[in-house]
Amino acid sequence: MLMKRRTLFGALASVLALGIGLATAQPRTGGEMVIVSGENPRHLNPAVQSGVATAVPGTQIFASPLRVDENWNFHPYLAQSWDWSDDGLSLTLNLVDNAVFHDGVPVTSADVAFSIMTIKANHPFQTMFGPVEAVDTPDPHTAIIRLSAPHPALLLALTGALCPIIPQHVYGDGQDVRDHPANNAPVGSGPFRLAEYRPGEQITLERFDDFFIDGRPYLDGITIRIVRDAASVTLSLESGEADAGIITDASAITRLGATDGLTVTPRGFEGIGPIQWLAFNTRVAPLDDVRVRQAIAYSMDRDFILNALMRGVAASQQGPIIESSPFFNPDMPSYNLDLDRANALLDEAGYPRDADGNRFTITMDTIPGRDSALGNVPEYLRSQLREVGINVELRTSPDFPTWAGRLASGDFQMSMDVVFNWGDPVIGVHRTYLSSNIRPVIWSNTQGYVNARVDELLAEAGSTLDTDARRALYAEFQDIVGAELPVYWINALPYHHVFDDRIELPLSIWGMMQSMDEVYWTEDR
Amino acid sequence: MGTLRYILQRLFYGLILITGVVVLNFFLIHAAPGDAAEVIAGEMGGITEEMMAEIRANYGLDQPILVQLGLYLSQILRGDLGMSYHFNQPVTTLIGQRVGATILLALSAQVLAMVLGVVLGVLAARKPQGILSGFVSVFSTVGYAAPVFWTGLMLVVLFSVVVPIFPVEGMISARFRGDAFDYALNVLHHLVLPASTLAILFLAQYARLSRAAMIEVLGADYVRTARAKGLGEWRVTFHHALRNAVLPILTVAGIQFGNLISGALLVETVFNWPGMGRLAFDSVLRRDYPTLLGVLFFASAVVVIANLLTDLSYRLADPRIRTGGR
């Protein structure tokens, strides 16, 4: 009898547990999420401002035509479907008919056209909509993007923070969009609307009840807390004052990874593709000699950098295209520790050791403001290069403009740098290697690298729609720059998402830089 | 000299001083390499040189530096501190949003430091060779010598991580929802650590000063007389002696005002306190000239006014100063 009762209770408990299990599998509505951010946005309009700090709030406030998932597949968002023309010179977007801005005005194709042309004219990433000639609007829910040449990065450029649809009735008033007052009080059609913005302190977003996707967003609100001190960012995540955040510091990643109740993951940064590299000024001796650049690459122990200096939290990165991208070529030339070869190359290049064993002295700059993320890599490079007879003088810059000024004006020999891929190579990779992009501005081809075949390959890959054909073109490009090393790619910067275990947070290639209408608490906080 | 004439004269010198501060700061900031356009390029992930030129033209950075200075000074005369390059908002608005937080922090720290410092100093002075006196001396020296950001971080580790009773950062909880009373409580909760950090720095000075002043006063004839009259030790210490020892303490309180503001700058950065210090810190890094100059202008004006008020209160309190010491 007793046995029977236990069985009955057991069965009942199982049914209950199953019920609860099923209940948690369903998204729950309600609750707020606090995100801690180490950076302060200039404003909240991603149409005219790139960067993570603007993109995270900006993609909650503004909806974009498309979304992309973690496998680089595109999905409907404001556009419920899209069609390429056969010649690849026009893309038709069929918009949903129930989307409204936070002020109640319907979203139409005119807003889409206005947004794309505004972004083309004002956004720093000129290649995103470079080939766009016009956007036609045959009816309020159809927008046709007309191109001067096929543009393979167009679909990606229509996702996330790259293409916020901004209201023409607000931004089309003749004022300069880059300094528009509405950038600090934006009106979008995204899942959350701005409730309060205290610059430099806090951005409070609340659920937009008339969001065009029924039942979304699941959260009642998102608060972004701006905390400029890196240690305080870590502590507020550890103490539960914040529920989610983005961190790059290896020791913070290790520490928070060991904290109960927190998920720490490198996923969600495939889109930005942050690469840490050593840039060479290829116009000045001794770095104008490819053998010297190769010798430097052969002096480094990649495993030591990844496992010891970066504490095992950074991913390998041996080329110009982030390794998680479908266009990365794993067979490109790679360099690992081989001091004999490095010495031989330097001898061959005509830089023999003197009586003290030195060959030459070289200056190395480092990008300021990323000290914790760079780890001790600059010091390690210095000690390794001494092994092969190269003296390195480390030159630090007190702040970003000092460093940027040196690189932009060519007043450097080599420099540690952090550069983002921004999804498609057309947007974030070409700029570093095209000879036409040798310009006196930061993150252009400041290395002064010139290779006619590379120029050809990039031009072709930038106007070919077929992914396999592009992959082949980029493979050859990576083979060439891998051999010529205008840049020595060290590792992927260890960007990580941190969030409370009880939050269900789908991470696409854009991570938190895409609409978070699908985010929910699996249980009460 | 009449008090009104004195005030006018001091105000005139104050204006010259503030102008000097503005001009000097203007040249210092512009002497640093790079400008706001490069910062914006950095935050943008790289921009074209055309955009850079446009930004420089918009902000007037392409003008000769003396022209920029002239424009800036004429702007200030009209009560306009310009637009922040970073926040794209009037600098006066930005300062207005933050001045309350800085004043709250600075005054709380000042009061805390004065009250605790004087009490500790007085207690220590009663037995100059005692244990408490030794403790006050050591604590004051360590508190004064320790960098304020280090003290702050140690307090955070201790009271926000090891014993989590105070919040890590900010002035108000990110999740705060409630009425005005709850708001005040929430701010008070957040205020404890930053105010204590800043107070520890100044507490040391007040404790040492009041200890020294009290030792001197307690040895004076009138204190001996008071004791001889049979007054209680408490009354002698706090009624007769402290009243006479308090003048140098007030002097220091006035002079310290500028230091208090600069101390608040560091404390605000450590505790993410949304005051003017953090605004100044961020604008240095961003080459946000209008904001930084605005904050420095505002801070120097406040210090000049505070010093003037201190001097005036002296003249009212001590007739010897009013009559030029004759």
Image: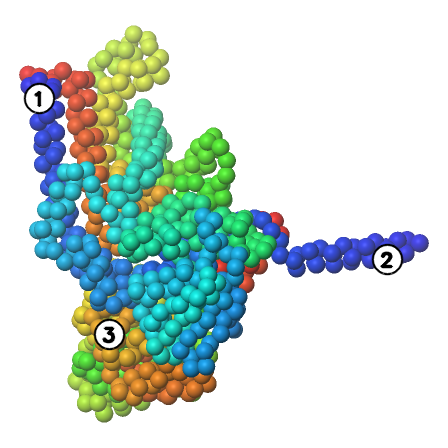
Find disc 3 in the rendering and name its residue: A446
Q: Quadrant of residue A385?
A: bottom left
Residue B315, horizontal then vertical, whole percent: 15, 20
Give the side of residue B73 with respect to residue A470, left or right: left
Q: Secondary structure at mark 3?
A: loop
As drawn, which residue projects farthest toward the right? A1
Q: Label 2 vs label 1: CA separation? A: 97 Å
At 19% from the left and 30% from the top, the residue drawn is B305
User: Mark 3 — on which chain does it sit?
Assistant: A
Task: Bin the neighbour count of mark 3 within 10 Å (Cα to Cα): few under 14, some 14-19, many 20 and up.
Answer: many
Answer yes or no: is residue B237 visible.
yes
A177 lies above or below A462: above
User: Mark 1 — on which chain does it sit?
Assistant: B
Q: Label 3 vs label 1: CA separation? A: 62 Å
At 26% from the left and 59% from the top, the residue drawn is B39
A145 lies above or below B29: below
| Depth check, front residue: A363 or B66 | B66
Q: Secondary structure at mark 2?
A: helix
At 53% from the left and 56% from the top, the residue drawn is A98
In the rendered structure, find residue A7 and report the number of the disc placed on it: 2
Find disc 1 in the rendering and name its residue: B5
In the rendered structure, find residue B77 and report the number of the disc placed on it: none
Q: Amino acid at mark 3?
A: Thr
Q: Quadrant of residue A230?
A: bottom left
As drawn, which residue projects farthest toward the front? A138
Marks 2 and 1: which is nearer the front? 1
Residue A484, horizontal then vertical, whole percent: 29, 86
Marks counted in the figure total 3
Q: Amino acid at mark 2?
A: Thr
Q: Amino acid at mark 1?
A: Arg
Residue B267, horizontal then vertical, whole percent: 33, 44
